[in-house]
Amino acid sequence: MSNDVITLAHGSGGQAMGQLIENLLVKQFDNPYLRRGEDQARIALSSMNSESGTLAMTTDSFVIDPLEFPGGDIGKLAICGTANDLAVGGARPQYLTCSLILEEGLAIARLEKIIQSMAHTARQANIQIVTGDTKVVGRGNADKLFINTTGIGFIDPRTHWGMEQITAGDDIIVTGTLGDHGGAILNQRENLGLGDALQSDCAVLWPLVEPLVHIAGVHTLRDATRGGVNAILHEFAKTSGLGFEVSEVLLPVSDAVRGMCELLGLEPLNLANEGKLIIICKNSATTQVLTQLHNHPLGANATVIGQVQEKPGVRLKGAYGVTRSLELPYFEPLPRIC
Amino acid sequence: MNQAVAIRIQGTIQGVGFRPFIWQLAKRYQLCGDVCNDGSGVLIRAYPIPDLQRFTQDLRMHAPPLSDVQNVGWQFFHWHQPPPNFSIRASCLDGSQTAIAPDAATCPECLAEIFSPTSHRYRYPFTTCTHCGPRFSVIEALPYDRERTTLHEFPLCSDCLSEYHSPDNRRFHAESTACPDCGPKLIWLDHSPHVRHLDPLATALATLQEGKIILLKGLGGFHLVCDATNEQTLATLRQRKQRVSKPFALMVPNHQWLAKLVVPEQLAVAHRLLSSSAAPIGLFRRRIDAPIASLVAPRLDELGLIYPSNPLHHLIAREFNRPLVLTSANQSALAPMLDDEHVWETLGPLVDGMLGHNRKIVTRVDDSLLRLDHQQQAVLLRRSRGYVPQSSLMDEVLMLAAPLLAMGADLKNTFALARNREVILSAHFGDLTSLSVQNQYQQAIEHYLKLYQLHPEHIVIDAHPGYYSHQIGRMLAEQLNAQVVKVYHHHAHVAAAMVEAQVKANQQVVGICLDGLGMGPNGTWWGGECLVADYQSFEHVGGLPAVALPGANLAARQPWRNLLAQWLAFVPNWSERWPNDLADCPVQPLSAAIARQVNSPLASSAGRLFDAVAAYLGCSPRVLDYEGQAAISLEQLAMQVSSLPTSLTMALVPCGDQYYLDMTDFWQQWLSVKGSRAQKAWLFHDALANGFAQLALKVADARRIETIVLCGGVMNNLLLRSRFEYYLKSKRVICARQYPCGDGGLALGQAAIGAAQLQI
Ligand SMILES: [Fe+3]
Ligand SMILES: [Mg+2]
Ligand SMILES: [Zn+2]
Ligand SMILES: [Zn+2]
């Protein structure tokens, strides 16, 4: 049956497209903004539960292969990724756009499941998908499904997080085990057969971020996605001119990811996460930050992994005290990971 | 107006008793005038003019034992008022062209003094004279004079001063001389800081007698020292150092003890090599009944042995009178610097005490290491104390207009300075991975540049952008405003051997370069290559086919990974043959990772091929404890053969205008050989040499090349070297001997390539 898969007709602007949008997208994402059916979402400024805050806006495209993976799918990821980019700036993620690029031949049932997952993730996180777009391209012109989401949120006036706040002596905190997303994708995509314990950590992190907003001494936050913790530390090091030294023995890594890294010669610090924050905070704020993080299941394994130092660079202190500089890998070990 | 002559001498002539020798010579010739050290060497001014032919002949023939006269030139001049006698003038400073002498082992005269109760220097651990003692390791600047050594903090007492000023005394201008009244003193530190130890040496000895481990400060760094006959002590040392099986070197008190450790057929040559003024560690075949702890060198047929080489070592060795473990603490990742406080702070927890002294260390110098080849000739594996900074000369065509610095490689690192035709290879720094060793390396580069007063205008780096030496080289180039020259790793290996063998610049060679891994052009990873090269350029003509390095760097630590990679590539039905003792290796997921190229770059590494064969023959641990361990075990196994069942050939597969070794054919033949493990190990060495020799000969004959170079760290395997020499009898075969053939000699080749490329 022809309506089992996406055809070029679904992108034609005609009847097939209208049905797809109505029956699937509007129905799943259902909210008053979308229901109006205008070409744009109309958002009253008064709805932004903030009077003097700053608007935060971000966009991200998701091209992950495979579309479904242990612990999530591209739909969930498309919500989490953009929501987290807002959250790490101290902004509560509120409104998202959703733009789909579909490849001719994509099974509609598969698309439905992904859209459901997207809607579910958004609803759980109190995020509304307020406008969107759908395009279909011919076979081979895209790989099954690409999603772009753009999000906005308001930053609480009390927060001024940013890399310029980082100071030597600060602690480096991660909110949980490293490399879970990268490990899960690698295992599935390359058919390594390393078992079900490798699950993506894909999650919306705002609930973890919100209680940090009022803590003085929190200097900056990041979500450690592509390139892992290492890539973020390099960004910090480059911008701040400071040193970031982490200890191998302090890194929280699940047994499954550790086993995989030992097999493949990979560094957990280089693997992607989709539900982990790096927090740089003043040493005096560390206890309070950790207490807050430990209150939430997503932060149960939060821990200090190192310190910011005067001497520039990114360094790893090994188990036997060998300190070496951590380079960025020359090539991305896994493309299309988000 | 009087006609006089100025004689200029160049070479290793400072700090070796050269000026008193000239003084005595001048007296014999009844000359007036003077002699002095300056930045360019030794300058003699003489009146009247002697028979120059005879004078310079005498000068060359009778020069002091530690000197090396390279050049003698003269010029006539008018001397208004020649002095009435011949004297030794104070040094005059200017730009330096003089060679610095390496450190030399204690001479017999000094030794006699140390052990003579009536001598003023009885039991004095810093006794030296012009014939022995520290040179390079104490020099802070040139010319070599006491005020520019680390001994300037110890003003000479009147007795020492009069010896220093008497041309007929053994200590005339012995810049590092000292005595108990004026010189450095020993210090003992332990974990009970409030107890005062009146005799540090006696305390250290007592501590060693109790089976404890101490830190010992030497010339160019620190050693860990303990009783080598005490199994319990060795177990503690291994546990504290986190070293499972890497062998430790032993300090052997005397010849008598040497005879208890070394097999009789190597005893004479071992004694001779260990007694040289360079005083290296030598690897010799051990006696089965050698009375030492089994944990010294587990499962190895060879022992690393060294004789006491400075007074402190002599004092300890004679009194302890048993072999002592003497292992470098310089490379220890925990030792950031070479100063005592830092070392005690960081290494203190590993030891029970430290015997130090108040003479500071200005640059790291480790013990050198050599081994005997099949003809009982010495081959240097690590070139450091006793050899550094002796220089080599490049072909005159490579004469440099401006100084050059070559950064070396990241493992077994040494760097090189070059000026004019001269290349000076640095002491050994080893693995640059840890930041503390990178620090030592950078400080040493600074020290050497200052010492030789060089401002390099060109910095040669390995092409591998991930090498720390590459990155540090680029950084230095920016700081010094120097130009960067990028050199490929295996080309540098070939060139290093060429420099040592004094190959001319217009000559082409065929290079067989076997090592672990280095970057080739266009993103390739090399390690088993045949190149046609001269100093300036090279062409790749074939070698080993590339296979996966599963887990990248992990492949160098876990030999079974390479067996899997080789077999996936070349052995059909390999899973039926997979060795039982490797049955629990995670073969399935790793095969998937190799198939999908997950962190499994392709490389044509000879080192990893050795690992694969060693893994199959079960002669290496699952995870290696030190670099080269599997290859060493494999060589050792092969050396046990007494007869051979058959011989193997290695086929060559043409590919474009290159040839590759046919590994499918090799594995098939080799696996079907019915022979012992030792025979199989031997046949592998032989087949590999045979294959590469055929390849080299094919190329050499086609291009009328007469010289074949063997290089790369795998050539430390002396069985392999001897098989190569056998198959290449018809050609001139060059292989390093004075310099390490592996990455420890790489900078020498880098310097020559840099120099050649600058000639264009
Ligand atoms: Fe090499
Ligand atoms: Mg993003
Ligand atoms: Zn002496
Ligand atoms: Zn004195």
Image (cartoon, rainbow, N blue to C red):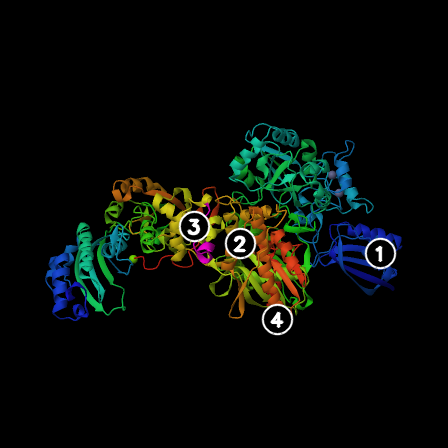
Mark 3: which amino acid? Glu
Q: Is mark 3 within 8 Å of ligand 1?
A: no
Pick whichever of labels 2 and 4 is earlier in the sequence. Answer: 2
Measured Cα–Cα span from mark 2 to mark 4: 30 Å
Q: Which residue is mark 2?
A: B670
Judged by depth in the image, the label closer to the viewer, 2 or 1, is 2
Q: Which residue is mark 3?
A: B576
Q: Mark 1, residues whose alpha carbon is within 10 Å: few (<14), some, or many (≥20)?
A: few
Q: Are marks 4 and 3 on the same chain?
A: yes
Secondary structure category for the residue under label 3: helix
Asked if the stretch drawn in magenta spans residue B568, the answer is: yes
Mark 1: which amino acid? Asp
Q: Is residue B456 visible?
A: no
Residue at mark 4: chain: B
Rendered-image quarter of ligand 4: top right
Residue B358 rendering spot, x and y as whole percentages: 63, 39
Q: Which residue is mark 1?
A: B58
Check the picture and name the quadrant holding the C terminus of chain B: bottom right
Residue B320 rendering spot, x and y as whole percentages: 67, 32
Judged by depth in the image, the label closer to the viewer, 2 or 4, is 2
Pick whichever of labels 4 and 3 is earlier in the sequence. Answer: 3
Judged by depth in the image, the label closer to the viewer, 4 or 3, is 3
Measured Cα–Cα span from mark 1 to mark 4: 50 Å
Q: Are marks 2 and 1 on the same chain?
A: yes
Q: Are marks 1 and 3 on the same chain?
A: yes
Q: Which residue is mark 4?
A: B702
Mark 2: which amino acid? Trp
Q: Mark 2, residues whose alpha carbon is within 10 Å: few (<14), some, or many (≥20)?
A: some
Pick whichever of labels 2 and 3 is earlier in the sequence. Answer: 3
Q: Magenta span covers which residues?
A: B565-579
Residue at mark 1: chain: B
Q: How many marks?
A: 4
